[in-house]
Image (tube, rainbow, N blue to C red):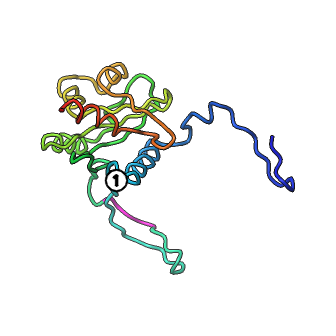
Amino acid sequence: MIKYPGGKKSYKKPDSFALTSRRGMSLEEDINKTNDYYLFMDIGVVHKKPTPIQIVNVDYPSRNKAKITEAYFRQASTTDYQGVYKSIALDFEAKETKNKTLFPLAALHQHQLDHLRAVNKHGAVAFLIIRFNTLDETYLIFAKDFLQYIDTSEQRSLPIKWIRDVGYLVESTFKKPCDYLSIIEDVCIKEKV
């Protein structure tokens, strides 16, 4: 316990687990923070796509306190993120699961799979980023791999063993809590040179 001048505030030193774990941080927050770093350092430009909604009703108690009270999705959204890295178009979906042994395919909508299949066919690097929250592991799986698995398997999930064999473990640092571009660099750029 550290006492501050005047005795008004105190600080309890956190344990080392709390310092290293991303508890409370969602995958989306980690990706957004990483994307901000990529943009600031001029590494790449990747943004979360807004979900298209149709506003139906707004409550205006006062001009500065307007609140949307009713809205609908205009259309099914495609994927979460799009961007560009070293002239490569990127398109990906980010998902989290509490399951320790598999990622349920029900978490992916058919229109998302169709979109990833289409952008992959047209040359973009399409992929999934999946975080297993209870394992504190995050993987990048390229669309070509998981789409082939879905097309040839009767499974309704991606087993963790398959993900670990085919996917790439995403490293986490303070500035880049979900450093997926290093995988894109290693797999899509360095392997082609």
Q: Label the magenta part by its dominant secondary structure.
A: strand
**Residue depicted at 15% across the width and 43% down the height:** 118
Dividing the picture into quarters, in which one does residue 92 lie? top left
**Residue depicted at 54% across the width and 80% down the height:** 62
* Residue 5 versus residue 184 in the image, above or below: below
Q: Position of residue 42 (x, y in %)?
A: 35, 52
Q: Nearer the viewer, residue 97 or 87?
A: 87
Magenta span covers which residues?
A: 69-73
Quarter of the image with the C terminus is top left
Seen as rendered, the residue at the extreme left is 122
**Residue depicted at 19% across the width and 42% down the height:** 114
Q: Does dot 1 land on a helix, a strand or a loop?
A: strand
Q: Is residue 132 magenta?
A: no
Q: Nearer the viewer, residue 135 or 14?
A: 14
Dividing the picture into quarters, in which one does residue 122 lie? top left
Quarter of the image with the N terminus is top right
Q: Position of residue 48 (x, y in %)?
A: 35, 53
Residue ID for mark 1: 47
Q: Position of residue 129 (x, y in %)?
A: 35, 37
Q: Nearer the viewer, residue 123 or 181?
A: 181
